[in-house]
Amino acid sequence: MSIVMTAITIDCADPRTQAEFWSAALGWEIESVEVWDAEISRGEKVVQSKESWSNIISAAPNAPKRINFAKVPEGKTVKNRLHFDLKVDDLDTEVSRLVGLGASIVERRARAVDGRIDQGQDGWLVMKDPEGNEFCIG
């Protein structure tokens, strides 16, 4: 049996805004409508309005190919059960950049190193994207 993950889908209120934020955050491209409409799913053409979805795609060979943002009527009410963990070279610079894109800082987390709390290189931050979805960066 062979299984291929083709996308991660995130429910949201505003797919385009979410796609713009995550595209800028990750350096991925926003996928064109023509590409998505042309794809075939179980022998049927996939057709959705632009307002109901938006996608970003990665050219990196080891990254997931696509993140879908699907419009849903209900809002987020609890903590995510799945979140992104992002690794960066310069934490302060990237956190500032993401805040400028619309993210917010939830809290700084620390790791214990040799019995002491270390919030330097080994620490990370919990952040939220513009719709309140948590992600970690360190």
Image (tube, rainbow, N blue to C red):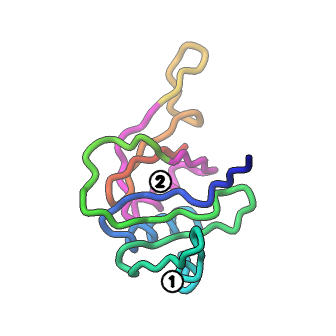
In the image, taking residue 16 as reference, residue 26 lies left or right, namely right
Q: Which residue is mark 1?
A: 33
26 or 113: nearer the viewer:
26
In the image, taking residue 87 as reference, residue 61 lies left or right, namely right
Mark 2 surroundings: few (<14), some (14-19) or many (≥20) residues within 10 A: some
* Residue located at (59% from left, 73% from top): 43
Q: Are marks 1 and 2 in contact (CB under 8 Å)?
A: no
Q: Which residue is mark 2?
A: 95
- Please report the bounds of the magenta region as a residue range: 84-109
Q: Position of residue 23 (x, y in %)?
A: 52, 69
Q: Position of residue 30 (x, y in %)?
A: 53, 75
Task: Please identify, in this view, whether the residue under mark 1 or under mark 2 is nearer the observer.
Answer: 1
- Residue found farthest to the top: 115
In the image, taking residue 122 as reference, residue 109 lies left or right, namely left
4 or 80: nearer the viewer:
4
Mark 1 surroundings: few (<14), some (14-19) or many (≥20) residues within 10 A: some
Q: Secondary structure at mark 2?
A: helix
Q: How much space separates mark 1 and mark 2, taking CA atoms?
A: 31 Å
* Residue located at (75% from left, 61% from top): 61
